[in-house]
Image (cartoon, rainbow, N blue to C red):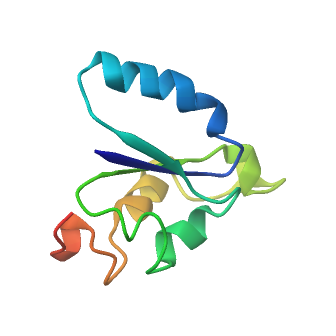
Amino acid sequence: MRVCISSTFTAEPINRSLGFWLAELGYKFDIEFGPFNQVFQSLLDPQSIFALNQGGVNVVLVRWQDLGADYKAIPIPIDCCLLSLLSPVPGSGCWADGGKA
C-alpha cells in the first residue's frame, strides 16, 4: 500500500510513528511525502503523488493557521470546507468521479 501525504507544514516527523503503526497492523506500505506546503498543487496536478497513487491512500494534513492570518474569520462552516476537499477534481482518478482508486 502506498501512503502519500501532503501538508501545509513539515509532516515528515510522523514518518516513523506512522510506519510503526502500519507495520503493527500488518500492512505492507510505502510512505511518500509531497513537497512542503504544496497541498493544492498536490490535489490539482495530474502528475502529483496523489494523482499517480492508484489504489493507495492519499492524506491531506492542514493546520488551520496556515490558511492565513484571518483563518478564524473564514465565513464557511468547517463541514462545508471538508465536503469541498472530498469532492473529486475531474480527471483526478478519484473513486467519486469514476476512477479506479
Report the number of discs: 0
Name above or below for residue 93 compared with residue 15: below
Name above or below for residue 77 compared with residue 38: above
Where is residue 17? Give x, y as percent.
51, 21
Tell which residue pokes out farthest to the top in this image.
24
Residue sitting nearer the eye, 38 or 33: 33
Residue sitting nearer the eye, 38 or 85: 38
The quadrant in which the N terminus is found is: top left
Where is residue 58? Give x, y as percent.
39, 53
Name above or below for residue 20 compared with residue 62: above
* Residue drawn at the location 79% of the way across and 57% of the way down: 68
Q: Quadrant of residue 94?
A: bottom left
In this rendering, position of residue 8 left or right of residue 28: right
* Residue drawn at the location 32% of the way across and 83% of the way down: 90
Where is residue 26? Give x, y as percent.
23, 22
* Residue drawn at the location 46% of the way across and 78% of the way down: 47
